[in-house]
Amino acid sequence: MKTYRVAILGCRSRGTSAARVYQAHPRTNVVGLCDLLEDRSKSLGDELGVAGRFTDLDEMIRQTQPDIVAIPTAPYLHAPLALRVLEHGVHIEVEKPMGMDLLETDSVMEKAEEKGVQVAVHHQWRLHAWAQAISKYYESGKIGELRYIYASGKGYYGGFGLMEIGTHLLNSMIKFGGHCQSVTAHATRRGRPITPKDVLPAPRGNGTIAGDNVTASLQFPNGVTGTLLQHHLESNDVNAHVIELYGTEGRLLWHTQGAWHLPNPHMVPENNLDRWEKLTPLYPESFEEAAKKIPDGSTTEGDYWFVEEYVRALDERRPHECSGHEGRHVVEIIMGIFESAAYGTRVDLPQSDREHPLLRWRKETGLGPPDPMPMIDKEWLEEENRGAG
Ligand SMILES: NC(=O)c1ccc[n+]([C@@H]2O[C@H](COP(=O)([O-])OP(=O)(O)OC[C@H]3O[C@@H](n4cnc5c(N)ncnc54)[C@H](O)[C@@H]3O)[C@@H](O)[C@H]2O)c1
């Protein structure tokens, strides 16, 4: 059985998690670490016993000949770095979201197709142990036929939350609902509908956004519908963070604290509260041994499942479950949500105009791209608050 060679491009927080998990998995081996800041690849290399440390990504790929290159960098760098890495004809995984608009995601997919390699997008929530438990119940018909999917972020500023957390939620929603056919959305800033002047660069280099509260209604195949809430809460609240599947015979719910099954389609508190059954999380066979090698191994099971799925996908010569195809569709939905909220119309997907709809909206009213904003959340929120009056 082949051991896949992996190189990591970007060695800070997410790169460290990715490198630890790839190094711990029995079928993957980290052969190269690259960061513009040498001390980052050095300390990670020292921890994991990886000798190949680089500051130049092309040099790393030439010297280490990886099968997969992971790209855990700031969002605005995902597509530019993915394109550079793909030139080498290697498989990639790129952090979420896949790109800042559809022009970017299209160019990444075209390059991957030209080179005959895979793109996977790091939407590990679709694969983590609770999601596996949900999938098992769902596939065994426990909730009957799917009717509706509800999802909510954990309270970030709406448009930013959509790029930062909505990307995960949507990728999980399309797992069950299939590809979204159309979107209708509302976005408000301090309670009034957004205008072109409310379009802003997001914190953390997460593209162009608008709205502190965003609510989207999604139409999936077979009459299934969904709602996605990205509402700005006073402080982030993991308990707001949830996905729920409503079927003809029951419901499945999961958030960061677990996953539950209700064997009834409707919630009647006095009859149903004690009928919610907590599910058992599911791990890959090799996880227990591997987790011993990962500092804080228990919390990295989603990343571990993501690697496990890459190994299986490459072995079986099929796309990763969180493929670029799925990742691009997530960006189609996000752009559809912004477009619908801006223009007040239903948006059919996939859209033929691939330009960022909020930038197009501004252009049509004679405005250029919005002025730069701070990258750090707290400073960004202060500046946004000033702007909102
Ligand atoms: N999947 C998840 O659950 C999850 C959770 C949190 C964050 N994220 C995503 O992770 C990303 C942020 O990760 P982070 O906080 O570790 O990022 P970061 O920006 O702090 O670190 C990126 C590292 O990459 C290096 N780098 C950038 N360009 C480079 C280049 N050309 N060559 C070599 N090195 C380069 C930087 O020096 C830096 O050390 C974001 O995309 C975010 O959306 C995902």
Image (spheres, rainbow, N blue to C red):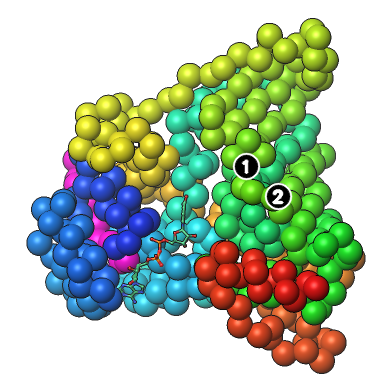
Q: Which label was assigned to residue 25?
A: none
Which quadrant, please, contains the N terminus?
top left
Magenta stretch bounds = 1-10
Between residues 174 and 221, which one lies in front from this camera angle? Answer: 174
Q: Is residue 6 magenta?
A: yes
Q: Is residue 5 left or right of residue 283?
A: left
Q: Which mark is residue 237?
A: 1
Residue 56 is at least partly visible in this image: yes
Q: Which mark is residue 233?
A: 2
Q: In front: 254, or 119?
A: 254
Residue occupying image coordinates x 69% and y 62%: 159
Q: Which quarter of the rendered image does ligand 1 occupy? A: bottom left
The x, y position of residue 86, in whole percent, is 37, 71
Q: Position of residue 375 (x, y in %)?
A: 53, 72
Q: Is residue 134 above or below residue 72?
A: above
Q: Residues within 10 Å of mark 1 (few under 14, many from 20)?
A: few
